[in-house]
Image (spheres, helix red, strand yellow):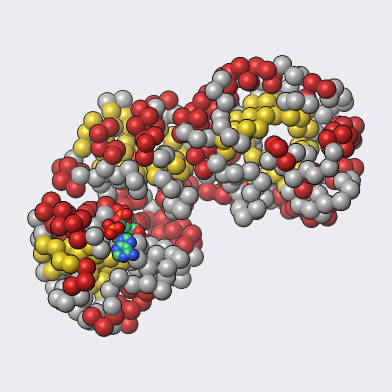
Amino acid sequence: MICVSIGRGRHRHMIAEHKHLVENGIRLVELRLDYIQGEVQVRRLLRDRPCPVIVTCRRKSDGGRWEHSEEARQTLLRTAIVEGADYVDLEDDIAAGVPRYGSTKRIVSLHDFQKTPADLTLLHKRLASMDADVVKVAAMANHPTDNLRMLQMVHASKVPTVGICMGDIGVPTRILGGRFGAPFTYATFNDDRVLAPGQIGWRQMREMYRYDSITAATRIYGVVADPVAHSLSPVVHNAALAAAGIDAVYMPFRVPAEQLDEFLSAASRWPLAGLSVTIPHKEAVLKHAAHTDDLVKSIGAANTLSFAADGITAANTDAIAAVESLVAALQGDERATSDGLGLKTTLVLGAGGAARAVAFGLKKKGVEVTVTSRTADRAKKIAAEVGCKSVEWAARQRMPYDGIVNATPVGMHPNVDESPYDKEHLRPYMVVFDTVYNPENTLLIKEARSAGCRTVTGVEMFVRQAAIQYRIWHGAEPPPQVMREALKRATASAKQPL
Ligand code: NAP
């Protein structure tokens, strides 16, 4: 079950949000009395409540907003109990002093904004011993394995327990609580008004992560990156899983570079079924792979991991997706042949992971590739590995090419007024491919269209690389249009025919 926390300054706004949530199918809300400005009228909030409530009044030291005396706070909580609130949240230092009364259930809670305590079992025992109907632990995650410890505590407990790791490292505990036996998870009313670090909006929790249909059998997938909050992979994969009715969920795993080895070594304890891999882990994951194909070996980087009893299999779907995107764009072009792309020469801008994958993919298709990068040495290195040419960044526009591929972040949101290639050098015979997908219509793409070039957007590559991952993981044909639409909605790009 999803419990939505409502924190509003006015009673009428809190009541209106409560009503709205119930009309939308929410069956439990948390009323955060500490957000109310002025005198709190508990009876007014509870009187005609449309669904069960948890009454919480959080001190500043526990992440709340309560500014008045502790005595007044505890009086409010006792009043809520007398008024028959369904649940009342009592912090561990006051729970023993507030006796059980009537039918109100007691949530005994602990908050730690610094760390996830080392001995969660002992902590849980102490909280449960305070006549708890529900134990709640919300603690900051500093390490991805904090999540596992928290979820294992939830799983092992006899008293219903909500265990949440805060911060963006802790997001998986919010999504997977039910899978490990938690009675509910907390979500916010509004995506932009989070009441605790790492909280997710209720719509996203319900519609994107399908929280209520996650069970112990649900397979776990995700994207491992640092940072990861901006990733649109959860949007695309979850939309596809929902459309196909596959019992799996896909989530962001923020894993700092120095913690990757430990995270992957613990994969079977979640258990993880598959991961997309992005910056900065694409190369570092390889040493964990028991199986790699020739493409991964030659590129030296993987963006897809599959977990099985006989070890991890690493794949690279970026290179294939880039080539497939160009093939689709060149369909009907008189230059295209059955085995070749129809591009004789192509300039790849950038020398990172995407550039490397694109350069390999194009070279394999017989294209004469030239790589250019702001940092000349990186371009030279890729050129040596791929067996192609490199050119100085300042000289990138001196020679004409059939194809131009942007594999730098130039033009990406919020720097939407930038382009890595001047429009004066664009020619109608060129195919211009921008791997940036947010926004879809970058300045480079817009200027290329104006110059009469064929264009390929990063949305097309992104959907294709995700679709290949889907095939690898689920052994089924993905719904590309569902994925494309989900990505476009998320980037709020204008509808464009692909
Ligand atoms: P990366 O490994 O960090 O490499 C980024 C490259 O861009 C480096 O060569 C970097 O040069 C260059 N660069 C960065 N800022 C620049 C600037 N202001 N001017 C000129 N060059 C600049 O990143 P990546 O994984 O290759 O990803 C690059 C881009 O590709 C991403 O931003 C993303 O939009 C896109 N991408 C798209 C897809 C897709 O499916 N559509 C998939 C993967 C990536 P230095 O070495 O000098 O820093």
Task: Give the quadrant of the N terminus.
Answer: top right
In the picture shown, does residue 206 fall above or below 247?
below
Count the numbered circles shown.
0
Q: Nearer the viewer, residue 376 or 434?
A: 376
Q: Nearer the viewer, residue 181 or 413?
A: 413
* Residue name at image x 32 percent, y 43 percent: 281
* Residue name at image x 66 percent, y 24 percent: 160
Left-right relation of 134 to 267: right
Q: Nearer the viewer, residue 281 or 86?
A: 281
Left-right relation of 31 to 251: right
Q: Quadrant of residue 449?
A: bottom left
x and y percentages locating residue 163 in the rendered image: 60, 30
Asked if residue 378 can be seen in this view, the reply is yes
Q: Quadrant of residue 60?
A: top right
Quarter containing ligand 1?
bottom left
* Residue name at image x 34 percent, y 32 percent: 261
Q: Nearer the viewer, residue 131 or 97?
A: 97
Task: Give the quadrant of the C terminus.
Answer: bottom left
In the picture shown, does residue 262 fall above or below 227?
above
In the picture shown, does residue 120 fall above or below 277?
above
Q: Quadrant of residue 71?
A: top right
Asked if residue 165 can be seen in this view, the reply is no
x and y percentages locating residue 214 in the rendered image: 53, 36
* Residue name at image x 37 percent, y 72 percent: 418
x and y percentages locating residue 101 in the rendered image: 87, 24
x and y percentages locating residue 53 in the rendered image: 77, 39
